[in-house]
Image: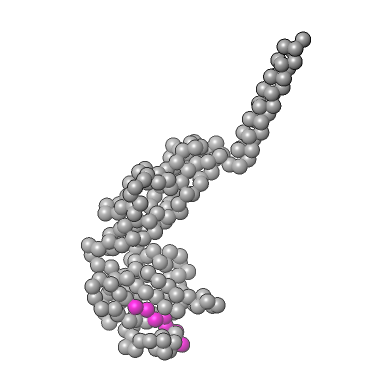
Amino acid sequence: MADVIQIKAERRDRVGKGASRAARRQGYVPAVIYGGKQDPESIQIPQNVIVSLINRGGFMSHTYDVEVDGKATRVLPRDLQLHPVSDEPQHIDFLRLVKGATIVMDIPVVVIGEETSPGLKRGGVINHVRHDIELEVPADAIPESITISVDGLDIGDAAKISDVTLPKGVVPTITDRDFTILAIVAPSGLKSKEGAAADEADDDAEVETTKDAEGGED
């Protein structure tokens, strides 16, 4: 599960475009917390705090405790609006996370076991079919990543969702097939050599066939 990051915010008494522009002029990012069968809560967060969190990476997949007036609410960013020119954050929608609820998220894939993969030792490369997996996860226990091992995989082998041990309560949204996450494939150079060798063998066979045919006419 990803570490929960603390964010201190202020309540917004005024809402609307004018109020949001005023908040941004004062160095804040307007935001709203919604969901959990509770009324939406309008807040504002210092812009430098949000920019710092965005620059850390993975902003949209981390959970946060947003503290307003001494009360913390566990949230997950669901929408981030950026300025079209400056890329400065303009508005954030946070989903309120309630214990026992589930949400659908794209969870990134982390690969391990490269040093013990026969295919990689032979010069093969990893073909990432999916860099992340869409999963239904507990709202209060969101995994930071899903680990895929290529230990023992040779060229031509693949790792599928059935090869992954998912955390408790986590299930894939695709349930009608055992889908591939990654595969070990031959590098293009090796493929070219194998193709050239096959073409050369075909040419030799054709020559031998021709000679046999010519010998039969004598």
* Percent x, y of residue 67: 30, 77
In the rendered image of this protein, does residue 80 appear above or below residue 198? below
* Percent x, y of residue 152: 44, 37
Q: Residue at x 37, y 44 (%)?
A: 178
Q: Residue at x 72, y 11 (%)?
A: 216
| Quarter of image, res 35 | bottom left
* Percent x, y of residue 173: 34, 54
Q: Specify the farthest residue to the top.
A: 218
Would residue 214 appear left or right of 190 to someone viewing this image?
Answer: right
Residue 6 appears anywhere in the view: no
In the rendered image of this protein, does residue 210 appear above or below residue 195? above
Residue 166 colored magenta? no
In the rendered image of this protein, does residue 133 appear above or below residue 120? below
Q: Nearer the viewer, residue 196 or 170?
A: 196
| Quarter of image, res 40 | bottom left
Residue 37 appears anywhere in the view: yes
The residues colored magenta run 25-32
Q: Nearer the viewer, residue 3 or 155?
A: 155
Q: Specify the farthest residue to the right.
A: 218
What number of labels is visible? 0
Quadrant of image for the C terminus: top right
Would residue 187 appear left or right of 205 to someone viewing this image?
Answer: left
Quadrant of image for the N terminus: bottom left
* Percent x, y of residue 97: 28, 68
Q: Residue at x 42, y 78 (%)?
A: 91
